C-alpha cells in the first residue's frame, strides 16, 4: 500500500481545521480577559511566531522522510531513549484526545440542557473510531469538504455582523502597554501553535509532495491564525471587551447580533455547526495520532486493531475526567499549558539541536 496519499491541498485543509479546533468558540474570552481592548493584537503576533514553529516542525519532518513523530524521536535520541520520548508523546496526545469529547459534552449541555452528557459524547466517540477504520485518505478528503463548509459560513457570519461594529471599543490602543498583549500571546500559543507538533504523525510520511507539503502546513496555519485574528477582532468590535471577557462562548453570543429580516435569525446555530465540525476534525487529528503512535510503539502492524479499545477508554475518560468547568480550566492552566509547551516547543527545539550536533559529528 502506498503511504504517500495526502495531497498538498488536503494537508492545507487538514492542518488549518485541526489547529483551529475549538478555539473558534472560546478563545476570544481568554484573550480579552488579559489584553482588554488590545486583544486583537495578540493573534497577529501569534501568526508570526506560529509560522516560525511550523517551519521548525517542517524542518524536522523533512530531515526524516518516511518516519512519524515516534520514529523521529527514536532516530534522534536512540532506540531506548527515543522510545521513552515517543511514549511520552503518546501520553500527551492521548490525554489531549479525551479532553475534546468533554468539551463537546459541555457545549452540548449549554444548548441542550436536558440531554445527558453521555448521550452527547457517545456518537462523537463512535465517529472518531469509524474515522480511524476508514483511514487517513478518507479523513483528509473529508477535511476538504469541511474546509469549504467552515470558510463559507464563517465569512458569511463576519459579513453579516460587521454593521454592528463600533470602532471605539478598540480605543485606547496599548493603554496598559505591551505586557497584557504578550499574556494574550501566551494564551494562544498552546491552543493553535504548539499542537502542530502532532502533524509529524502525518507529515512527511503520508505526504505525496514533501517540499510542497511543508508550504501547505504553513498555509494551513496562516488560515487558522487568520480565522482566530478575525474572530477576536470582530468579537471586540461588536460586543466590547467587557462582554467578551465575561462570556463562556463569546463567538456564539456574537452570532446573536445577526438579524437580517426573518430569514437569518438565530444564526448562532450556524456558528455552533462550524465549531462542531472543527472540534470533530481536531478530535480525529489527536485520536488517529494516539492510535497510530501506540501501534508503532508496541510494534503492531495494523493500528486499526486498537482503535475500538482506545475509543472506549476515550469515551469513559471524557465522561469522568472533569467534574465541572472550573476543574477543566484549572487543568488547562496547571496541566495542559506546561505539557503542550514542553512537547510542542521545548522538545522540538532540543530535537533540532541534537540533530545538528549529530550532523556535525557524522561529517
Image (cartoon, rainbow, N blue to C red):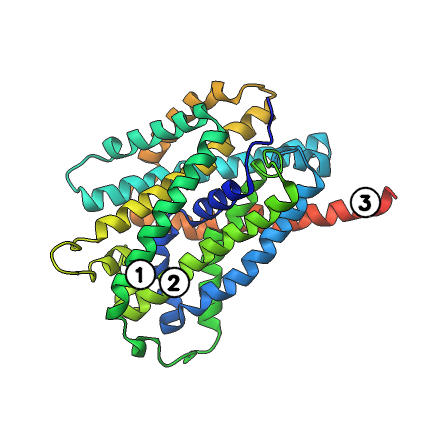
The reply to whether the C-beta atoms of the residues labelled 3 and 1 are less than 8 Å apart is: no
Question: In the image, is residue 97 above or below residue 53?
Answer: above
Residue at 22% x, 52% y is 268
- Mark 2 closeness class: few <14, some 14–19, many ≥20 residues within 10 Å: some
Q: Nearer the viewer, mark 3 or mark 2?
A: 2
Name which of mark 3 and mark 1 comes first in the sequence.
1
Task: Identify the element where label 1 is drawn.
Answer: helix
Name which of mark 2 and mark 1 comes first in the sequence.
1
Q: Is any part of residue 125 visible from this angle?
A: yes
The reply to whether the C-beta atoms of the residues labelled 2 and 1 are less than 8 Å apart is: yes
- Mark 1 closeness class: few <14, some 14–19, many ≥20 residues within 10 Å: some
Report the Cα–Cα distance between label 3 and label 2: 42 Å
Residue at 27% x, 71% y is 165
Task: Tell me residue 254's x, y (percent).
Answer: 25, 60
Residue at 47% x, 42% y is 14
The residue under label 3 is: 359
Question: In the image, is residue 319 above or below residue 340?
Answer: above
Q: Quadrant of the C terminus?
A: top right
Question: In the image, is residue 8 above or below residue 135?
Answer: below
Q: Nearer the viewer, mark 2 or mark 1?
A: 1
The residue under label 2 is: 230
The residue under label 1 is: 158
Question: In the image, is residue 82 above or below residue 302?
Answer: below
- Left or right: 199, with 63 as reference point: left
Residue at 34% x, 42% y is 277
Task: Identify the element where label 3 is drawn.
Answer: helix
Name the foreground residue: 134 vs 175.
134
Task: Tell me residue 75's x, y (percent).
Answer: 72, 35
Amino acid at each position: 500500500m502506498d503511504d504517500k496519499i495526502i495531497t498538498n491541498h488536503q494537508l492545507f485543509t487538514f492542518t488549518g481545521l485541526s489547529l483551529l479546533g475549538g478555539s473558534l468558540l472560546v478563545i476570544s474570552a481568554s484573550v480579552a480577559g488579559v489584553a482588554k481592548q488590545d486583544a486583537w493584537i495578540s493573534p497577529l503576533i501569534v501568526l508570526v511566531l506560529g509560522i516560525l514553529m511550523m517551519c521548525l516542525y517542517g524542518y524536522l519532518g523533512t530531515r526524516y522522510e518516511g518516519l512519524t513523530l515516534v520514529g523521529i524521536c527514536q532516530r534522534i535520541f536512540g532506540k531506548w531513549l527515543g522510545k521513552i520520548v515517543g511514549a511520552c508523546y503518546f501520553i500527551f496526545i492521548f490525554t489531549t484526545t479525551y479532553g475534546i469529547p468533554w468539551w463537546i459534552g459541555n457545549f452540548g449541555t449549554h444548548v441542550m440542557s436536558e440531554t445527558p452528557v453521555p448521550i452527547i459524547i457517545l456518537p462523537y466517540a463512535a465517529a472518531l473510531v469509524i474515522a480511524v477504520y476508514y483511514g487517513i485518505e478518507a479523513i483528509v478528503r473529508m477535511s476538504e469538504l469541511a474546509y469549504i463548509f467552515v470558510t463559507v459560513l464563517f465569512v458569511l457570519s463576519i459579513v453579516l455582523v460587521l454593521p454592528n461594529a463600533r470602532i471605539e471599543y478598540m480605543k485606547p490602543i496599548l493603554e496598559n502597554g505591551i505586557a497584557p498583549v504578550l499574556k494574550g500571546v501566551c494564551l494562544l500559543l498552546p491552543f493553535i501553535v504548539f499542537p502542530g507538533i502532532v502533524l509529524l504523525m502525518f507529515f512527511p510520511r503520508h505526504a505525496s509532495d514533501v517540499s510542497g507539503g511543508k508550504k501547505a502546513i504553513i498555509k494551513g496555519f496562516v488560515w487558522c491564525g487568520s480565522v482566530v485574528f478575525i474572530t477576536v477582532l470582530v468579537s471586540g468590535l461588536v460586543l466590547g471587551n467587557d462582554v467578551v471577557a465575561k462570556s463562556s462562548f463569546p463567538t456564539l453570543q456574537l452570532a446573536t447580533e445577526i438579524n437580517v429580516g426573518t430569514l437569518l435569525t438565530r444564526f448562532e446555530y450556524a456558528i455552533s455547526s462550524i465549531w462542531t465540525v472543527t472540534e470533530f476534525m481536531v478530535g480525529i487529528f489527536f485520536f488517529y495520532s494516539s492510535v497510530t503512535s501506540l501501534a508503532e510503539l508496541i510494534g503492531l502492524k495494523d493500528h486499526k486493531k486498537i482503535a475500538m479499545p482506545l475509543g472506549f477508554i476515550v469515551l469513559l475518560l471524557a465522561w469522568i475526567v472533569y467534574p465541572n468547568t472550573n476543574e477543566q480550566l484549572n487543568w488547562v492552566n496547571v496541566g495542559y499549558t506546561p505539557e503542550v509547551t514542553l512537547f510542542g516547543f521545548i522538545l522540538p527545539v532540543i530535537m533540532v539541536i541534537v540533530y545538528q550536533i549529530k550532523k556535525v559529528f557524522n561529517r
